Image: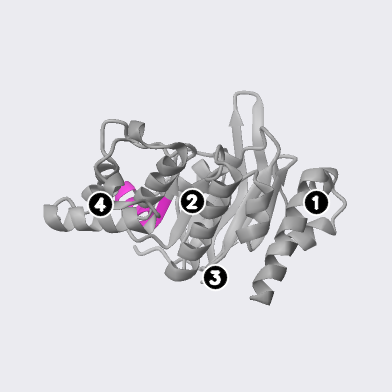
Amino acid sequence: MARLNVHDGDTVIRVQGLRNAFADQVVHDGLDLDVRRGEILGVVGGSGTGKSVLMRSIIGLQRPETGTVEVFGEPMIDRDESEAKQVRSRWGVLFQGGALFSTLTVAENVQVPIREYYPRLDPVLLDEIAAYKVAMSGLPAEAGPKYPSELSGGMKKRAGLARALALDPQLLFLDEPTAGLDPIGAAAFDELIRSLQKTLGLTVFLITHDLDTLHAICDRVAVLADKRVIAVGTIPELLALDHPWIQEYFNGPRGRVAADAAERAAAKGAGE
């Protein structure tokens, strides 16, 4: 019997009542979150608040104790594997650090998800697609035949991004994409993500602690604290709240520097 899904077309991810626990440690309890179509949603929180656990719950790598997860209106928990696989083909994931296969070249890494879903694809076409995705990620063509050990940290992240884009996804998950990058490299990566999001119409779920990234490219920010999402909104909306962690994070010295930098960038862009 066909399953009827009542779904708001503007909501790409819907998480309700999520509870995750490891032994006696409860990470999430009653967590709710909606991600809107076409937005870049930044996810922030202190250490141990379960940002990556939340992402893993959404993409099926962590089974929550209770709660529901829907992606594109489809339930993802306890879903038939063949049906879940079809939904997964519509998203791409950049794990923290890139998570590239060390024994495969960059091009071969990009080809892994394509081979999984299209095992009979012509090898010549496969190579062409991989080269195109490598170029989309901002890497030079000569990076394709290189192994991860031959790449810098920033190049590894771009190679991981190329693999995440392999299946032309509608939804992109990014886990700390600018961690470990110098300020110039991080800003360039932010610019790339925003450009891809606009060009491809992507929805982006972005875990980060980088205040510059939050100000530069995120449409809304979800704050994890007290085992749940305590607030979701634009940075000005969050700053209007009196939660101590939010105020310390966004209104502390580092937050004020990032806000000032964002204002200068916006003023410069308006004057050009």
- Helix, strand or loop for the magenta stretch, by majority: helix
Question: What are the residue bounds of the magenta stretch?
Answer: 81-92
For badge 4, the amino acid type reads Ile
Q: Are marks 2 and 3 in contact (CB under 8 Å)?
A: no
Q: Earlier in the sequence, mark 4 or mark 3?
A: 3
Q: Which residue is mark 3?
A: 8
Q: Secondary structure at mark 1?
A: helix
Q: Which residue is mark 1?
A: 256
Q: Secondary structure at mark 3?
A: loop
Q: Secondary structure at mark 4?
A: helix
Q: Alpha carbon of mark 4 to alpha carbon of mark 2: how far?
A: 18 Å
Give residue 135's position: percent from left, percent from top: 33, 57
Residue drawn at (39%, 45%) of the image? 160
Q: Is residue 105 inside the magenta stretch?
A: no
Q: Alpha carbon of mark 1 to alpha carbon of mark 4: how far?
A: 43 Å
Q: Which residue is mark 4?
A: 114
Residue drawn at (20%, 57%) of the image? 128
Q: Alpha carbon of mark 3 to alpha carbon of mark 1: how far?
A: 36 Å
